[in-house]
Image (spheres, helix red, strand yellow):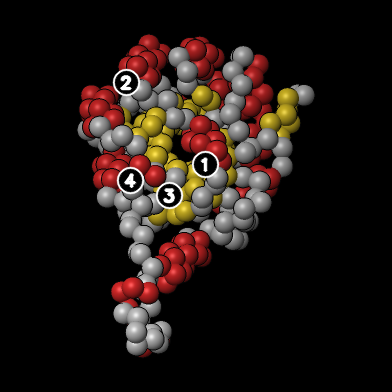
Amino acid sequence: MKKLFTLVIGFLLLTACVTAPSAPQTQPQPDSVSPTESQPTLSSAPATSDTTLYLSATLHIESKFDSWPADTESFLNFLQQTTDAGIRWSIGGDIGWLESADNAQEIVQRSAAMGAQWDNHAHSPNDLGKIASILSSWGVTPTGVVSGFLIQDFDGLQSSYSYQGYSWSPSVIWGGVVCPGHKEGCDDLSVSLYRPTSSSQFEVHDPSGKLIKLGGGSHQLADAETLAAQIAQGQHPYPVIGYTIMVEPETLRISTSATDDVNVILAFVERMNAYPFVRWTTIAETAQAWTDAGEIAFQINE
Ligand SMILES: [Zn+2]
């Protein structure tokens, strides 16, 4: 993460150098002109209305049985309740669930009818084409979001994937990890939006890169609130910032939390809506908003 971060800091320092008053000893002044008259007016900190915080929400239904939604109606009720509150869901279902769960097609179709989008979540890039093809065969067009990927596989994600005549191309990547298994230190928990250069230069923004990377933070509610409070204070002056909360499909609570259930999530939505700069969008819609706003790249490492 260092290089992009350094670039951003470098830019901020450069900006500071340009706008800061010159030190008297390096800028000789004619005796007749007082320093205050010759110095440019300092620009103040950007107004908070310059930033929009796009909040998204995801869940991954894994291939292993113990991550599957325990009950179809409870799962869909959870999605409906949170959707009614304003959350826009971005969901990923891995190949084992899509192919083996009796209720997979019903969940995909009924959640899509409520406005949920289906991203492409695979633990092997070889499954991306088949997953997209299954979703499409059920009448649900997958977004261009790769929801979870190994950073070492990034270079391979530049291509398109075909399965039985259906072709799918990634445009956005979310949830990068440097090592599999969600072990300590493996997940990229930064809040970021940029176009990575390559697997080996993953943190370096390439304006002409093919894929947009959305780093959605730690996915925890408390960290989203901290980020929003910082934005309110003008701390992150970027036009578009994205953050993603994540729910476990089997527990319907925030990922790894024992307490953050639907009621806690609904209260969180209400608190976040008090900020005038907060919007609820899907992951794909957040990336689109970033493009529409001129693709100002940034990385915030908390
Ligand atoms: Zn997974």
Of callouts 2 and 4, the N-terminal one: 4
Is label 2 or label 4 in front?
4
Percent position (x, y) of residue 60? 46, 31
The answer to which of marks 1 and 3 sits earlier in the sequence is 3
**Label 3 amino acid?**
Tyr
C-alpha distance separating marks 3 and 2: 26 Å
Q: Which residue is mark 1?
A: 293
Q: In the picture shown, does residue 280 fall above or below 38? A: above
Image height of 267 relative to 76, above or below = below
Q: Residue at x 66, y 28 (%)?
A: 130
For disc 2, does the CB lie below 8 Å from ligand 1?
no
The disc placed on residue 85 is: 2
Q: Residue furthest right?
A: 165
Q: Which mark is residue 238?
A: 3
Q: Which mark is residue 2?
A: none
| Ligand 1 is within 8 Å of the C-beta of the residue at disc 1 | no
